Image (cartoon, helix red, strand yellow):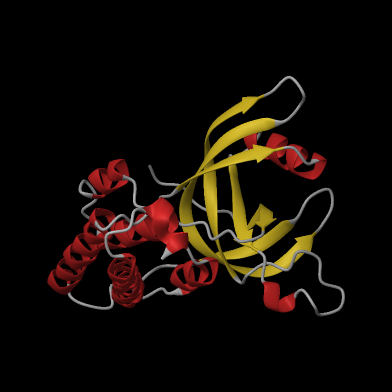
Amino acid sequence: MEITLPDKVAAMTLPGVAFFPQALLPLHIFEPRYRQMLKDSLGTHRLFAVAGIDRSLLKKPNQFEPPHRIATVGIVRACQENEDGTSNLLLQGLARVEILDIVREHPYRYIRIRALSSSPGATPDENARLCQSLSRLIITKQRLGGPVPKEFTQFLKTVDDPEAFVDLAAFNLCESAVLKQKLLETLDVHARMELFSSRIRTEIDTIKIQRKLQGHLSDDQIPHN
């Protein structure tokens, strides 16, 4: 399905969130401003952006929920309104965008955007090999007891496109909000995969060291070590 992004969309700004294309983000809408935003979105193109809050700008004067420059526009795939007026919805990421300007703040934030395209950064064969290597690293982390759902690794096996693979993996598995935002902002797909692969390797090494220090003690015996 082809969707042409408008040059202006509504936006939610959330702390500690980096939303990626292809990813599915469940949201509970309860604030009056976002209720109105959702109503307007459902009545038109069903699109709005989700941006993380840029904490480096919070201490500057006249800053209200300052967004990171790079965000993602998503489309509402499913929505259920509750009896109390709140709503539960599922937003699917469509495209990275650059926030050019905040057009207005009331009744909800409205932003001017520019769609961003990724570049391969390497040949298709090189990206395919790096994608396979990243997949093996994720499986290794899972086998070592890392927080990687088995169902998700099974799903990743069905994703052939390296960009979609790394975006979905980063959104669902990256535990660092700072790194997730950096991955979102990295438009070179090869560099994005290398960056996330490096992080997974570090996490694997950390798990191995913790296992070695733990020895034969069970998890509930660690405080006695």
The part of the image, by quadrant, that contains residue 155 is: top left
| 202 shown above or below 16 | below
The x, y position of residue 151, in whole percent, is 29, 41
Taking the spot 16% from the left edge, 74% from the top edge, the residue there is: 126
Q: In this view, does 131 lie to the left or right of 163?
A: left
The x, y position of residue 102, in whole percent, is 74, 65
| 159 shown above or below 126 | above
Q: How many labels does the image show?
A: 0
Q: In what quadrant of the picture does the C terminus appear?
A: bottom left
Q: Of residues 16 and 38, which is closer to you in this image?
A: 16
Q: Is residue 139 left or right of residue 171?
A: left
Q: Of residues 69 and 204, which is closer to you in this image?
A: 204
The x, y position of residue 169, in whole percent, is 35, 57
The part of the image, by quadrant, that contains residue 37 is: top right
Question: Residue 179: in sight, yes or no?
Answer: yes
The x, y position of residue 180, in whole percent, is 48, 66
Q: In what quadrant of the picture does the N terminus appear?
A: top left
Taking the spot 67% from the left edge, 54% from the top edge, the residue there is: 11
